[in-house]
Amino acid sequence: MKKLKRSARLVEMTQYLLFRPHTLIPLTTFAERYSSAKSSISEDLVIIKEVFEEEGLGDLHTLAGAAGGVKFTPKMPKEASLSFIQNLCQKLQEPERILPGGYLYMSDIMGQPHYLNEIGKTFASAFANRDIDVIMTVETKGIPLAYATASFMNIPVVIVRRDSQVTEGSAVSINYVSGSDKRIKTMSLARRALKEEAKVLIIDDFMHVGGTIHGMMDLLKEFKGTVQGVGVFMESSEVEEHLVEDYVSLAKLNGVDSKTRKISVDLGNYFH
Amino acid sequence: MKKLKRSARLVEMTQYLLFRPHTLIPLTTFAERYSSAKSSISEDLVIIKEVFEEEGLGDLHTLAGAAGGVKFTPKMPKEASLSFIQNLCQKLQEPERILPGGYLYMSDIMGQPHYLNEIGKTFASAFANRDIDVIMTVETKGIPLAYATASFMNIPVVIVRRDSQVTEGSAVSINYVSGSDKRIKTMSLARRALKEEAKVLIIDDFMHVGGTIHGMMDLLKEFKGTVQGVGVFMESSEVEEHLVEDYVSLAKLNGVDSKTRKISVDLGNYFH
């Protein structure tokens, strides 16, 4: 790349860092990329760091020394997440979201990249300091959330299937009891999808009793993996006791009353 | 926001634009945001535009006049997509990817946010000039690709289900013939998931005969929608004739030979 002026370099470095979260970038990479002195690069990074912090985009952490460099960790300030989720709670209480059977329609929200990004950034902030290799989710509705989170954490996603797919090779299957209807169901994960002893973050869209998430935890044991965290977009408060104890929720569904056409959605435990 | 120096403003504007693709941003938004004159903002945009173009990030289009502003359209230069897909083709030919039944394992690649971003950016470039309201895909493996593409196009995703889910309300179901095993299957989409007469881009991971994609097209007719484009990551060349004629593929699977442990993957028609 040709030698750039500071102004162009700042634009270039900003996009370079934003697209490479959780990645240590040696200062020499930038110095060579822009044919600039390391001291100029360091000055640029100070400016970028200030803006990133001011804007609540995340931390820019500089490590000194030969093996040093700079690492961008996306983080969303809690107040920003709070005001975003408060707005979402309002939206989720619109009476036209009530579906037959007292279910709540939220696929439209889960279909919007903009919302998913904010949710993903919030989860990435909530679990930023844990040591995580991979995100696990179960088809279908958890998948977009898992990927949104993964893209801010720069880690891969594995998808647990509700049936064993022939196109995935040998798989490990377990039975679990679905909390909502107490039926026995099956979930499975391809042997090669997950290395042994992986450190895993479980992400899902909704937790009722917690049977599905508990099932994922059981499945994970078969791979000798450890659960480093559980994040659900919405939990149900209609349940006396969840099968899963340690989890982060962003919203809480208190109830859907089909008769009075009232939905009550609160903030989740992340904001307590 | 406090008044910013040009250097900080450039960092700020860069991230602001990158996170808001395909969105017209009035210059007054920036002028007010940074308490700066519109003329300074215009100068900043010239610098950003140059770097974005040089780096192959996309176009920064400025519209003059009272209703004017600036719009960032992410685009990946074809040579960049080409070299990325060529690398991926190499990876996909590793013999250990052969699964029982002659299938090809590629879930690890589809689980990496970095790869998904590049694929999504490529699809977003391929369809950048078409008039598209929404992306449609079918569960399960197409979902991450659909979202990656959607995030660069700033449009929502709807997910067609392989069974009719009670939690989605009334749904439209159709039967279709799966190309690979000639079995009759069902797919369905919630009534409220898609507005009538929507302009749709269909995205999926793999196209064999094209039965699933043809099914989505049939389903779309029930919603009076129109197909504006079809993008598949990989097509199979083992088929004499696809049920779908007009599509963009990024890679092409020529064959998996379980005996000789050879996989042959070529570039797709996007590069012809």
Image (cartoon, coloured by chain):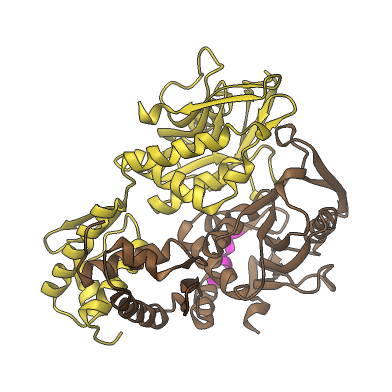
Chain colours: A yellow, B brown
Q: Is residue B79 above or below residue A47?
A: below
Q: Which residues are magenta?
A: B90-97
Q: Mostly what secondary structure, the magenta segment?
A: helix
What number of labels is visible? 0
Spot occupied by residue B196 in the image (x, y as percentages of width and height): 78, 54
Task: Assign the N terminus of chain B to one quadrant of the image.
Answer: bottom left
Task: Assign the C terminus of chain B to one quadrant of the image.
Answer: bottom right
Q: Is residue B74 above or below residue A238?
A: below
Q: Is residue A127 visible?
A: no
Q: Residue at x 53, y 59 (%)?
A: B151
Front residue of A189 and B1: B1
Residue B168 position by quadrant: top right
Spot occupied by residue A62 in the image (x, y as percentages of width and height): 17, 58
View extreme (front): residue: B66
Spot occupied by residue B14 in the image (x, y as percentages of width and height): 35, 68
Q: Residue at x 22, y 58 (%)?
A: B2
